[in-house]
Image: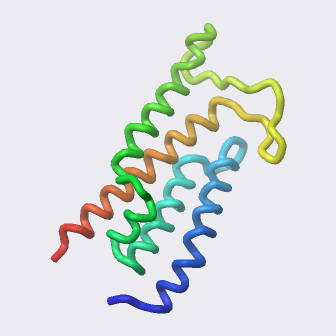
Amino acid sequence: MRSTILQTASNYLLPILFLFSVFLLLRGHYYPGGGFVGGLVASIAFVLHSFAYGTDNTLKILRYKPLTLIPIGLGLATLTMFLPVLFGYPVMTGLWFDEPIPVIGMIGSALFFDIGVYLVVIGVVLTILFTISSNTP
């Protein structure tokens, strides 16, 4: 069943929820949030679109299967986790750039770890939900 109201709402909510998920991702350095919560919100945005337009149309928006996000995120998180060892620090020590970036501020290795978690969460949630929805009669 296709609902015009849900499709119209989805068109407006998808970019807003995705932008909010990026905000949560960036905010998570000093406050609660980060990659996990941001990934869940981004997944909700795509699930809402899937309810409105169907799984196939949502997969066209994503361009890649969500399953490919999992190894990319795990690789990024693992690389970020072990990168301090190359500089003589313990595993998972935060490394920070010397100069702040306008609008964002100081960037450290925690951001890249959170981005990896963000990608893993999106990949896992969407893979599970799209697999379940595609196997139903």
Seen from this angle, which residue lies furthest top? 88
Q: Residue at point 63% right, 38% down?
A: 111
Q: Residue at point 52% right, 49% down?
A: 36
Q: Position of residue 42 (x, y in %)?
A: 52, 60
Q: Position of residue 128 (x, y in %)?
A: 30, 58
Which quarter of the rendering shows the N terminus? bottom left
Which quarter of the rendering shows the C terminus? bottom left
Q: Quadrant of residue 107?
A: top right
Q: Quadrant of residue 130?
A: bottom left
Q: In the picture shown, does residue 119 fall above or below 20?
A: above
Q: Position of residue 11 (x, y in %)?
A: 55, 78
Q: Residue at point 67% right, 55% down?
A: 23
Seen from this angle, which residue lies furthest left? 137
- Colour setting: rainbow
Q: In the picture shown, does residue 9 fall above or below 134?
A: below
Q: How many marks?
A: 0
Q: Position of residue 129 (x, y in %)?
A: 32, 63
Q: Please state which of residues 28 and 11 is positioned toward the viewer in this rendering.
A: 11
Seen from this angle, which residue lies furthest bottom? 4
Q: Residue at point 63% right, 34% down?
A: 110
